[in-house]
Image (cartoon, rainbow, N blue to C red):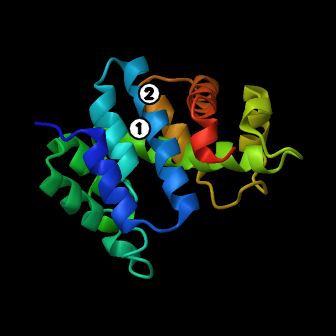
Amino acid sequence: MTPDRAAVLAEVEARVTNENLRRHMLATEVIMRALARRLGEDPDVWGLAGLGHDLDAEETEGDFARHGAVAAERLRVLGLPSAAVHAVAAHNPDTGVAATGRIDIGLIAADQLSGLVTAAALVRPDKDLAGVKARSVRKRYREGAFARGVDRAAIARCEELGLELDDFLGLGLVAMQGIAADLGL
């Protein structure tokens, strides 16, 4: 049985104190849900992988090889399906877990896209996600100096799922705009 969102969210709230990290996890969740719907996958399972993917970020800070693996184990204990648990472990290549499934690739791409969209909103004078346009996200994607920490190659992996890059950028933007208040944007 898949745990409900409330159980995973409670785990996030218990283990993640940084509000910006929590918001990133919410953004990744909503992108994963939208991506799952687009691909005909289970949005609840994909969303829970997105919500829980950085559950261990504060605990494993400074030990990046464990990041993802610890979260995956916690989510396994909560009862997440094995595909979601695998995706969480695989989203960090330093764990040595290969990203082989669609959910794995989706999480890798969504994780990075959430950072790009957030950065695109934060450079606006009003810091408002509602005013961000898909073409602006596309432009920022192409500017390597913008949001240097965002792995553009990871975002481009959306093409392995059969999505054009521009479609994925727009999908992520619209998904995040739907929860802008929760993201503080």
User: CA separation, marks 2 and 1?
Assistant: 7 Å
Residue named by callout 2? 35
* Residue furthest left as drawn: 1
The quarter of the picture where residue 173 lies is top right
Q: Residue at x 63, y 37 (%)?
A: 180
Coordinates of residue 136 in the picture (x, y in percent): 79, 34
Which quadrant is the N terminus positioned in?
top left
Q: Residues within 10 Å of mark 1 (few under 14, many from 20)?
A: many
Residue 113 % position (x, y): 58, 43
- Image coordinates of residue 132 in percent, x first then y, are 77, 33
Please tell me how crowded label 2 is: few (under 14), some (14-19), or many (20+) other residues with Cα within 10 Å.
many
Q: Quadrant of residue 77?
A: bottom left
Q: Is residue 50 left or right of residue 126?
A: left
Q: In which quadrant will I find the C terminus?
A: top right
Q: Is residue 154 above or below residue 74?
A: above
Q: Dot 1 corresponds to which residue?
A: 106
Callout 1: helix, strand or loop? helix
Q: Nearer the viewer, residue 111 or 156?
A: 111
What's the residue type where badge 2 is placed?
Answer: Leu
Discs 2, 1 touching: Cβ within 8 Å: yes
Q: Is residue 120 visible?
A: yes
Observer-nearest residue: 96 or 32?
A: 32
Q: Amino acid at mark 1?
A: Gly
Q: Is residue 153 above or below residue 180?
A: below
Q: Residue at 14% of width from left, 47% of height from top?
A: 79
